[in-house]
Image (tube, rainbow, N blue to C red):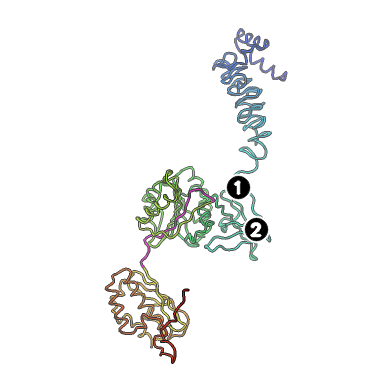
Amino acid sequence: MEFGDFLDFFGFLMKWDNSQSYSALAQLSMGRPEFNRGGGGGFRGGRGGGDRGGFGGGRGGGDRGGYGGGRGGDRGGFRGGRGGGFGGGDRGGFGGGDRGGFRGGRGGGDRGGFGGRGSPRGGFGGRGSPRGGRGSPRGGRGGAGGMRGGRTVVVEPHRLGGVFIVKGKEDALATKNMVVGESVYGEKRVSVDDGTGSIEYRVWNPFRSKLAASIMGGLENTHIKPGTKLLYLGAASGTTVSHCSDVVGPEGIVYAVEFSHRSGRDLLGVAKKRPNVVPIVEDARHPHKYRMLVGMVDVIFSDVAQPDQARIVALNAHNFLRNGGHAVISIKANCIDSTAEPEAVFAGEVNKLKEEKFKPLEQVTLEPYERDHAVVVATYRPVKGKKTFGRKKTATAVAHCKKGQGLIKVNGRPLEFLEPQILRIKLQEPLLLVGKERFQDVDIRIRVSGGGHVAQIYAVRQALAKALVAYYHKYVDEQSKRELKNIFAAYDKSLLVADPRRRESKKFGGPGARARYQKSYR
């Protein structure tokens, strides 16, 4: 013990009642063992004296009692707890650092240096050391450096729109940074010179984003691409939302819904720098509360991890998701039923989605990035439609028939404006044969390519007739389908059959024109 410290302490003792002070001093000089025993607190203990501290006092006794009073004597001693150390400042340390003791406690010596957390940026070691921990000047949010760019890094577009692959020492997913120079969660950034200027990409960590993990897991299509309107349920602090913002670009929009106010503050910070993000701090179970903020969307991404997740997605889909839109749902098995097998939980959630007019398209697990997680992609209220083909020589027509209002277009042009005009009546034969009333409830879009004008006209009329028959077969009834088929076949079988051998004659010495050679399966 330093002589100056002893004088300071002796002056403090003089403020006490003489009899008590001298008695305590006598005990100190005699080295009585009672002094080091854990007790109620120092010279007199309690609030009237050393205020929880004292020589041997405090709550923890000698090993945990502070040398000097105040809160510093509460739990710290020579080698003691939070208030340790000689000097007995607010909560410890040599000169009264915030929480540091000389060698003990949470912030003391070995784990926080002399000044503990109250010192400027940490002490000698432990949590408050100059390289790390809470009080360190390095690390922390945004502290990660960028990957090496330039010649050693190649950025290639991913098969999904708006997503890229960074190929360098190690491959990684990335998105083009919408706010150049800014990191959202300390992710690495890559700058690549494309000849016209520098383009910055943000590395997309699959361990921090379930959407990135599903892409790494082989998800065929997320349906999130440039220009998409996305409703994100369970946005949290905006980690994945920021990457979705990069993907949809300035033409798209991301409605980010988060219930937690703490996470909502971080989400607001992300939205301030990204004009295509609309933050909504509200409960996703009540979509009517934010119906005035959200328009019709193309995709819903859900990461709410609640037992009634399927119901939450369905409620939002009924309000905001267009017919034929898609839902991408991250399912955490333990949050739904921790006693069942994950595969059984996933199957149960898929069945719930089917009951809510969703049609599941694909499912992938998120191993090794997440345990007992899966992502399911489903389409909502799929549009009823059929796809058929028509062929003539080298011309091919593809027809998409769905429920509609009687619109028929070929290469984006109405049927009445097709050229050449002299063959237009040939194109309208299917309508004239069965009557336009049969086409009133359907829309047919036809794309034709290859061949000349005549071949294209014949390919289009065939695709038109086949599309109507296929639609009636799947969505109307079998009897109506048979009626249409008989009418077309009686007039011209080439409206339904695209076989060029139909009019070929039999070759001398050979099989018939439509005969096929026998196949051997031995």
> Image quarter for residue 334?
top left
429 on left or right of 373: left
In the rendered view of the protein, which quadrant contains the N terminus?
top right
User: In this view, which residue lies farthest toward the bottom?
Assistant: 508
State yes or no: discs 1 and 2 in contact (Cβ < 8 Å).
Answer: no
Residue toward you, 511 or 340? 511
Tell me if residue 212 is in the magenta stretch. Answer: no
Tell me if residue 377 is in the magenta stretch. Answer: yes
Give the x, y percent position of residue 488: 32, 81
Q: Is mark 2 on a helix, strand or loop?
A: loop
Give the x, y percent position of residue 492: 34, 84
Task: Give the CA distance from mark 1 to mark 2.
Answer: 22 Å
Q: How many marks?
A: 2
Residue positioned 46% across, 57% down in the render: 363
Badge 1: residue crowd in 10 Å (few <14, some 14–19, many ≥20): few
Q: Mark 1 points at which residue?
A: 142
Q: Name the residue under label 2.
A: 168
Q: What element carries label 1?
A: loop
23 on left or right of 421: right
> Image quarter for residue 508?
bottom left
Q: In the rendered view, tell whether residue 478 sits above or below residue 39.
A: below
Q: Which of marks 1 and 2 is nearer the N terminus?
A: 1
Residue toward you, 492 or 153? 492
